[in-house]
Structure formats: C-alpha cells, structure tokens
Amino acid sequence: MKSLHLAVPAILLTIGSTVMMFVDGSSWAIGLALGIVALVVIFMLREAIDWKYYLKHPPKLELPVLNFVKKVPYYKQLSEEDKKKFRQRLALFVIAHQYRLQSTAGAEDDERIEAPEDLKAVCSIPAIILLFNQEDYLIPKIEQIVFYRHPFPSPIFNVLHHCEWNEEDKVLVFSIPHLYKGVIEPFIYFDLGLYEWMRAHGAILQEVYTWAQFEEKYQITQAQIVQAIGLPQPDLNAVCQVLNIHRSYLKEL
C-alpha cells in the first residue's frame, strides 16, 4: 500500500525524535509533533492515497483469476485494447469493495472470512460487463458482497434463494455455485451476478414488458427465471436487461 510507504519516514521521524528527546532534551519535541501529525494525516487519508496510486498503477490479476477471465464469453470477444481495460477495471473494482464468505454453522456470529481472490473476480466480472462503456464503473451503492456455499434464507426472504440485494445495508449476497454458472456460461444459465448488479445500479429499461410479452420475445418462461433466482417475484426489468446484454455480443463469438 502506498500509504504505508509514505508512513515509514513519519514513523522514523517519530521514533528518532522520541529517542533524541531523552538524549538531547526538548528541542526534538517539534520533530516528534510533526511525525505524529503526519501519521494521523496519512491514516485519515490512507484510502484516498492508496486509490490514487492504484489508478496510476493498476495491479495485475493473479494467474488463476486471469485464466478464469479468459473463459468468460464477454471477455473473449473484446479487442486486445479492451481486454486490457477489462483486466485493469476488474483489479480496481475488487480493491474498491469488500468480499466475505459467510461463516459455517457453529462458527462465531461475528467471524468474518475474507473471500478468495478468484471468487472476488467471479462476482465482480458482471459489474465490469454492465458498465464497461461508461467512465464511472465502481457502483458505490454496493460496499460488501457476501457468499454462501449453498442456497440461503435471509431476514428479508425466509425461503432458500440464490441471490439478494439488500439496498439498506449496501450488500449483495450470492450462492457460489449458482453465481459461478451464470458468469462462465451466461447463454445456458441465468447470470445472477449481472442481475443483482443491474438492480443495485438502478438501470431502467425503456421498453416495458409483461411476463407474457417477455416469454414470447425471449422464449424463456417466468417459472424458469423464478427457479434460477429462487424467489417468486423477479425484477422483470433487470431480467430483460441481463438477457439483452449477453445477446448483444453473441454474434461476435
């Protein structure tokens, strides 16, 4: 982290001034004060400092993540320049959000397990696809993503389902196996990741459909969408946009 690097001189100044105060008297008090002030400022601005550094020097994706990205249909049809843009945005997007695995039964309620890097990428790829042609792509309405290893109930929906957007807490929740399938094979399985990122972003489709019109146009039934999501009342607007996005580049593959 760049902020940690910047903090090193301030730490050395603080330690050195403290030592010299015992050796040479209070004349080093100014150095001690400057060191402490610098550390406080760096601590308060650490996220902004680190983010500015990452924008200029985007981190590279780890090899397992890169290998997975290469399998994603949307990524395959991009130009080499856009593929680089996709990889950089994905790396930055992951840095900007928090990801955790839901603790297993019997674990402490407040135990937090950070998600592995490949799972972070799987979840974030749909968000990159959603806003790939826009400058602002971070979706600040979501701060944290939580993963279950299986379908889950929640305080909002007391039935087993596969994905959820909690607007109040700024959280997305996913069942890992159901999320994975839609990202890697979006023409076979419904892309739950893109669906929830779409809902959180708030994009609105201009055309308004009923479920009957939807089924006639897309040749997919409401029951199939309900089964994919696990909830009885899917957001039809978001469903349509997910299918439109993936179908828009199908001919390029």
Image (spheres, grey):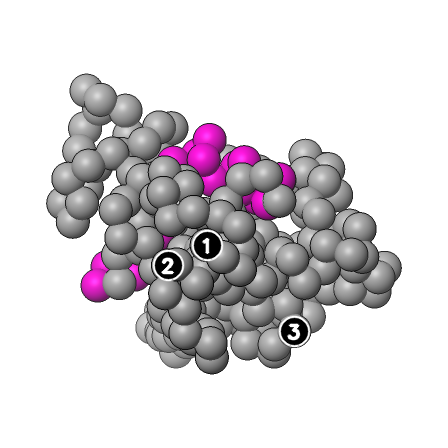
**Mark on residue 55?**
none
Task: State the SS at label 1.
Answer: helix
| Residue pictured at 38% horizontal, 28% vertical | 149
**Mark on residue 211?**
2
Q: Quadrant of residue 35?
A: bottom left
Rounded to the nearest whole Å, what is the CA distance between mark 2 and mark 3? 29 Å
**95 or 243: nearer the eye?**
243
**215 or 73: nearer the eye?**
215
Q: Are marks 2 and 1 in contact (CB under 8 Å)?
A: yes
| Residue pictured at 39% horizontal, 59% vertical | 212
115 on left or right of 146: right
Residue beneath disc 3: 133
Task: State the SS at label 3.
Answer: loop
Residue 69 falls inside the magenta stretch: no
Please state the extent of the stretch shown in magenta in the rendering. 168-186
> Residue 175: horizontal and vertical position, in percent?
38, 36
Q: Please name the amino acid that badge 2 sits on.
A: Trp
Residue 165 visible from this viewpoint? yes
